[in-house]
Amino acid sequence: MTLKKIRLELARDHDFPQGSPEHGYEFVAPLDGAGHIDVQGWRAHQKDCRVRRFWRGEDDFHGHLVHTPGRRWVFHYDLDSEPEADEPGYRFDSHRFAVGEYVSITEHDGVLRTFRVVSVA
């Protein structure tokens, strides 16, 4: 298990037909050798598992990667402790975080968006 900094950028969608490097997330997570988030590693390094949401024209959101009951991974932001501020990752428990892979996140506005993994360092 190694802590990795993962960058996600908005994939192609209706509003951004080419995708967008100005919309996305950077977060730190423990990944196993296959590129999956390691729950035991997360338990040992919860405070280090930070997230930054960047969105052109908006202030950055900063928070943590959190593992909730029911095996769900969410981005929980420090600016608001309300549950609706959380942004759950779709099937983050089974996704592989490797360059070129795609993942989806339900953002705070309730819209499910797809992001491309552009770096894992």
Image (cartoon, rainbow, N blue to C red):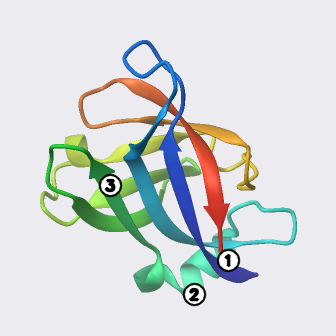
Front in this rendered view, residue 3 or 117: 117
Residue that numbered label 1 is attached to: 40
Front in this rendered view, residue 6 or 35: 6
Q: Quadrant of the C terminus?
A: bottom right
Residue that numbered label 2 is attached to: 44
Q: Which secondary structure lies at badge 2?
A: helix
Sequence order check, earlier mark of 3 and 2: 2
The spot of residue 62 in percent (x, y) is: 26, 66
* Mark 3: few/some/many CA within 10 Å (<14, 14-19, 20+): some
Q: Quadrant of the N terminus?
A: bottom right
The residue mark sitting in front, 3 or 2, is 3
Cβ atoms under marks 2 and 1 closer than 8 Å: yes
The spot of residue 16 in percent (x, y) is: 42, 22
Task: Examine the image and state in which quarter residue 41 appears.
Answer: bottom right
Q: Residue at x 35, y 23 (%)?
A: 111
The spot of residue 48 in percent (x, y) is: 45, 84
Residue that numbered label 3 is attached to: 53
Mark seen at residue 10 = none
The spot of residue 93 in percent (x, y) is: 67, 50
Q: Residue at x 15, y 43 (%)?
A: 57
Q: For the residues marked 3 and 2, what is the alpha-carbon distance in whole angstroms? A: 23 Å
Tag 3: residue type? Arg
Q: For the residues marked 2 and 1, what is the alpha-carbon distance in whole angstroms? A: 6 Å
The residue mark sitting in front, 3 or 1, is 3
Tag 1: residue type? Gln
Sequence order check, earlier mark of 3 and 1: 1
- Residue 72, compared with residue 48, is above or below; it is above
Q: Which secondary structure lies at badge 3?
A: strand
Q: For the residues marked 3 and 1, what is the alpha-carbon distance in whole angstroms? A: 24 Å
- Residue 14, compared with residue 100, is above or below; it is above
* Mark 2: few/some/many CA within 10 Å (<14, 14-19, 20+): few
Q: Residue at x 75, y 55 (%)?
A: 98
